[in-house]
Image (cartoon, grey):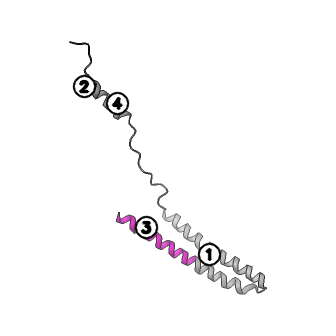
Amino acid sequence: MSDDPDLARLRSLEERLAKATEKPPEKAETTGTSFSQGELAWRMVIELVTGMLLGLAIGYGLDVAFHTLPIFLVVFALFGFAAGIRTMMQTAKLMTGQATKGEGE
């Protein structure tokens, strides 16, 4: 018997130690890449309210400037409502397209 250690066993041990100390491969995080239904609903509500508030503000500003209080306020409130609905529909279309794209993959 010799006092030399078995080189094959040492290499095997070194390989097992290297594997044990390796970090596992990092998974790609999926947080923040998709939205929940509640977040989408709030986004659409905010788009509608923003459109209406902008229309009201512009209408009120024009009414104050021209001293015709209810006319521009009503007209631009309706324009703002229509713009908010249009923006909501575009968002819904975009989200539907992304959902069908995600299902296809």
Q: Is residue 104 magenta?
A: yes
- Precedes in sequence: disc 2 or disc 3: 2
| Residue 61, picture quadrant | bottom right
User: For the residues carrying marks 1 and 2, which lies nearer the camera in this image?
Assistant: 2
Name the amino acid type tagged 4: Leu
Residue 70 is left or right of residue 49, and the answer is: right
| Magenta span of residues | 84-105
User: Distance from label 1 to label 3 (Cα)?
Assistant: 24 Å
Name the amino acid type tagged 1: Gly
| Residue 10, picture quadrant | top left
Q: Position of residue 36 (x, y in %)?
A: 48, 62
Q: Which numbered marker is on residue 51?
A: 1
Local crowd size for mark 3, using a 10 Å CA cut-off: few (<14), some (14–19), many (≥20): few
User: Distance from label 1 to label 2 (Cα)?
Assistant: 75 Å
Residue 15 is left or right of residue 74, and the answer is: left
Q: Position of residue 33 (x, y in %)?
A: 47, 58
Identify which residue is drawn at 34% across, 30% down: 17
- Precedes in sequence: disc 4 or disc 2: 2
Question: Which residue position is annotated with label 3?
Answer: 98
Question: Which residue position is annotated with label 2?
Answer: 8
- Precedes in sequence: disc 1 or disc 3: 1
Element under label 2? helix
Element under label 1? helix
Identify which residue is drawn at 70% across, 82% down: 73
